[in-house]
Image (tube, grey):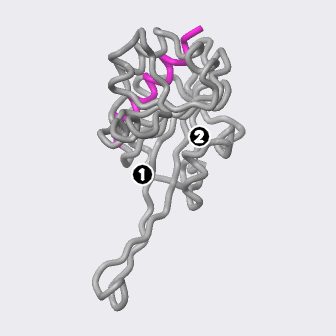
Amino acid sequence: MLTRYRHLTIPIKVLKTKFNISLPGDAGQHINQFELFNNDPGAKIGGTLLINQSDINCYLNFIKSRFSYSYGGRGGKGGQSFTYDKYQVWAFVTLSRDFGRILIRRETFADRILGIVHPVELKFKDDKVFSEHFYVVTNDKEKAPAAMTSDFRNIIKEMMYKNFVIEIIGSILVIRDNQPIDPQEVIHMTELACKIAELR
C-alpha cells in the first residue's frame, strides 16, 4: 500500500534505522473517531506502519490531505486556482488507562486572553510549568487529571514540539504534526509516542 506514495520512502528508511517496523493488516484503526481527522473531510490514509517495540502498541498513519487556493482577480474571480496534496504523519498509541477525551497543544497568547474571559482550560496546580506552556481541554475534569500523571506531563514537557497536537479518546492517543513530512520530525514523533506508550 505504501508503494503508491513514493515520497514516503525517505521517512520510512530513516525510521528503519531506529525502529523495528512492519505493515499491519488493517490501516484504519481508530482514526475516524478523532476530530483532528474529521475536521479535514478530504483527508485519506496513505498507509500505516506498526512500531514493533517490546510490550507497547504504537503505529504511524501517513495522511494525505488535498488543499486548494486561488489568487488574482477581484474576489477570486478571473484569477488562477491551484490544488495540491500535503502529507503528514500521525502517531497512534494505545494507553494503559482511560483518559476520557482530551486535547493538548502548546498554549498561545490568544488562549491566555480567552482563558481570562471564558476559562475552559484544565490547569495543574502542582505543575505550573506544564500549565503555563500547554493548553489542555477535556470533557472529564476528574478522569483527565488522574490519568495525566506527572510522568506523562514530564514527557510532554520534554519532547512535544510546537507544531505537535495531541488528542486522546479513552485509551487511544494520536499525535499530529501540523507540518509537512520531515524525516527527523517523524523520528522525534515516534520516540515521543513510544515514551508515552511505555507508561503504566
Query: What secondary structure is marked by label 1?
Result: helix
Q: Give the side of residue 194 with respect to residue 169, left or right.
A: left
Which mark is drawn over residue 89?
A: none
Q: Horizontal and vertical percent for residue 151?
A: 47, 9
Q: Give the side of residue 177 with respect to residue 143, left or right.
A: left
Q: Nearer the viewer, residue 101 or 179?
A: 101
Residue depicted at 56% across the width and 56% down the height: 43
In the orientation shown, which residue stands out farthest toward the right?
A: 25
Residue depicted at 33% across the width and 35% down the height: 162
- How far apart marks 1 and 2 lie (CA) works out to 14 Å
Q: Horizontal and vertical percent for residue 135?
A: 42, 31
Q: Horizontal and vertical percent for residue 132?
A: 33, 24
Question: Amino acid type of disc 1?
Answer: His
Q: Give the side of residue 47 with respect to residue 14, left or right.
A: right
Residue that mark 1 sits on = 7
Residue that mark 2 sits on = 48
Q: Nearer the viewer, residue 33 or 26?
A: 33
The residue stretch that appears in magenta? 182-200
Between disc 1 and disc 2, the foreground one is: 2
Dominant secondary structure, magenta: helix
Query: What secondary structure is marked by label 2?
Result: strand
